[in-house]
Amino acid sequence: MRHETTVHETSVHETKLHETPAQDVSDESQQPLQRPRTSRLSPITRRRMAAFRDNRRAWWSLLIFGVLFVLSLGAELIANDRPLLVEYQGETYLPMLHEYPETTFGGFLPTATDYRDPYVIEAIEAQGFMLNTLIPYSYDTLDLNLGSPAPSAPNGRHWLGTDDQGRDVLARVIYGFRLSVIFALVLTAGSLVLGVVIGGLQGYFGGKVDLIGQRLIEVWSGLPVLFLLIILASIVEPNLWWLTGIMMLFSWLGIVDIVRAEFLRARNLEYVRAARAMGLPSRLIMWRHVLPNAMVATLTFIPFLFTGAITTLTALDFLGFGLPAGSPSLGELVAQGKNNLQAPWLGMTAFLSLGIMLTLLVFIGEGLRDAFDPRHISAREQNA
Amino acid sequence: MSHPSSPADNIGTAASVLRLDDLCIRFGQTAVVKHLCLEVRRGECLAIVGESGSGKSVSLLASLGLLPGHAHVTGQREFTRPDGKTLDLAALTPRQWQRVRGGQIGFVFQEPMTSLNPLMRVGEQISESLRLQQGLRGNAARQRVLELLCQVQLPRPDELIDAWPHQLSGGQRQRVMIAMAMANQPPLLIADEPTTALDVTVQQEILQLLDRLRRDQGMAMVLISHDLNLVRRHADRVIVMRDGECIEQGRVNEVFDAPQADYTRQLLAAEPEGLASDLSTEDAATPVLTARKLEVRFTRSRKLFQKRPADFVAVHPLDLTLARGETLGVVGESGSGKTTLALALLKLQAAKGEIHLENERIDMLDRNALRLRRRQMQIVFQDPYGSLSPRMPVADIISEGLRFHHPTLSEDEVHQRVAQVLEEVELPSACADRYPHEFSGGQRQRIALARALILEPRLLVLDEPTSALDRSVQKQLIALLRELQARRGLSYLFISHDLAVVRALSHRVMVLREGRLVETGTTAEVLGNPREDYTRALIQAAGLG
């Protein structure tokens, strides 16, 4: 029964094929004849992409997340305490690129201009104009002219209110989003490279390499990450790169298992043996024949690694072991929300921004996983 | 023959057990079985033969209601119980099905390795259906299981009743499967390629067992097989199927001796035939591959606080020479060390002993030097589905080795060579841009052959290249291999368990058993006049004797 169901789809055409090898009866193989030589996507990949796109929830999540991330990359052009453009006495200034002393605009101090100062604004607007960004505050701009004590509630001036130091919450969310995603991207990419290399070597060579490697990994994974971070925080001022580095030391461990198992399986496949019989060196065999197999399982793991990284950063910031004070961070916003229950917009904003971001990522991950699942694809085709 | 044909009325007196009338099965748009009519009578063995994909298994699975939900089945299906009551199989409820399957119809599957639950003892698996169908429990059930195990001639039944499936060999597992199918003395037994996965000598025993059980219990049997030899010896009537249609049916000797349909004739003629062409004396004197005292051992792992067990010797020391343009057939049952021997000769497996390739000793070479020699010795594997990377287009698969060994070739030259070699293995050059999944088994094996040939090897190891293929495809491949040998002066090391194919291709034959050389000599000597009993048993089981 097992035999019949698996062989079935291909074997129906088999007998016909022998007579006319140039013609294939199955539907999917008729287009490939005209397929341009340049297309390097294998049919499996194309089918998976189609499956992903058919999952509307995942596809829209990817689009929305993509747009949000691209927008946040230009955070400086959206939320900044410096104007995009200043026209003063017929001359044009670009405050984002250059520091101009206040004297440029008729002030007294030789220090850098504070474009939020009502005096400066008045001076500039008297003899020109200034073009502000959509949100005229950066993540660290203290608004000294709040009508009420900080944290102030949302109003026309601060759309999501301010935090307990009088900083604009929306600006902090935008910068915080960017920071979280970049942290997660770097961490995921780094742990992917480490995990695939280490897991791949262990799986491909097996034997002693594998045995020793696995024992070392077991010891390594026993180290308490949080304590290490706390100790680190007392020695150096932890910045984004320190944090990424420390987290990367441990986050690759999850990938190793998957990659190792896939390599162990694939190294005895006949086409890998055939490649060895052809005399190809191990690195080429691993790169060309084994890795593509292992990547399927690994790719489906990535979105979850990604969300894990974001949550970790948030948790560390919430506890105060994360980014240096003053950095725009969602975890710090959560902590502020907790400390200022009288200002619910802080907690709500933190909750919603984290919630939406993680939900989008989980949807994307789910879509990816389903797209790579052969059972899912065949079920989809049967329904079609 | 697309119109429904009525079953030949051969065993006129016996009552019909299973009757299929105008059975049609579709998966989506694809019709897999078209207007099939068949009837099995009491005590009769009906064989269904056909190549893979001809719909032979599907039609019987459909009659048992075992097809996946998206299969569309029409036509009348009737099963008559021994008490004379006729059931309409198309209208059974799931509860009624449970009584019929196992109780009234037994099923033996092809793959003994995977059809037993690995986490259940043998006895429990058999008694499960006894409990469900007859309500037997405890000691009564155990007694009945022992009885069944004796019936299927399992050695040491009182011991093996408590064995786990992994402790049994393939043949023993198949016996357990048969005991399970026979547990409730069903009036009908369906055996779907029951011996394909087994060694020839075991095949013989299993079929004799089935024959005996059928005679003793007056059971009807449907034997699904692609092996014509086996059908001729064990079946009463035969149905030949192709592309889901019944091509011909009738008594076995009538169909085999005087086939009416062209396709049946073609199937019968597809038995490998011919012999290897003679070697010139010059070629015969030029050895391509020589091995002396080649031995492969596997060290077994030591358990804690125990002495390391003795090494497992996969290949006992043996000598071997292969001349230019010669084919050496290596024959033996599974586990005899054929493949290990081949891998050792190619240095893909650690081994002791000397190996010379064209006057150069290669067992002492370091890895890089060896890698360059690999061009001269290539291998084609058994499984045409597993030996091609599914992610690479055919052109890349074939050219990969070429690009590595000849990095100076331009892109155009590579393309040209790929086209040449595709032509040589008789595939259209349009194949180059396609992916392996678009090809049939026989075509894939040609691609694997092209991948090996493009490196212009002196020696080609063929590890069961034909055993996953249908007979008619095998025949084409054998013809191709012969032609290539003549054209290129290739030496083949041809590994197979199929003596008919070995006879058609080899100049000399080596018979291996449990890693030891049993007998060696020219093909005519060994297969025509065997000295050893084991060789004789193999030949007889293969139906060549």
Image (cartoon, coloured by chain):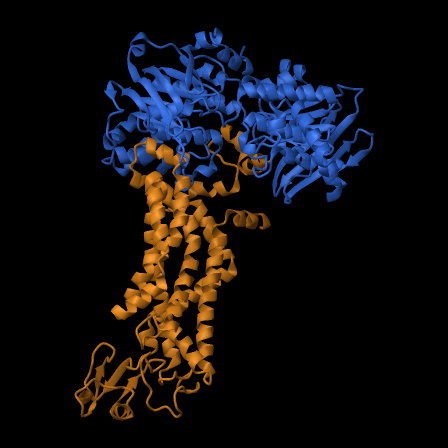
The residue sitting at the front extreme is: B305
Q: Colour of chain B?
A: blue
Residue B56 placement: quadrant? top right
Rendered location of residue A135, percent (x, y): 36, 81
Q: Which chain is orange?
A: A
Task: Decide: is A140 above or below B152.
Answer: below
Rendered location of residue A327, percent (x, y): 32, 75
Task: Decide: is A54 above or below A314.
Answer: above
Q: Indicate the quadrant containing the N terminus of chain A: top left, top right, bottom left or bottom right.
A: top right
Q: Would residue A154 appear left or right of B357 to someone viewing this image?
A: right
Residue A314 placement: quadrant? bottom left
Task: Decide: is A54 above or below B268.
Answer: below
Q: Would residue B84 appear left or right of A323 to someone viewing this image?
A: right
Query: In the image, what residue occupies the spot 24% across and 79% down?
Result: A94
Rendered location of residue B76, percent (x, y): 75, 35
Q: Is residue B260 visible?
A: no
The residue nearer to you, when weighing B469 against B367, is B367
Task: Decide: is A92 above or below A64.
Answer: below
Q: Is residue B216 visible?
A: yes
Rendered location of residue B372, percent (x, y): 25, 30
The residue nearer to you, when weighing A333 against A295, is A333
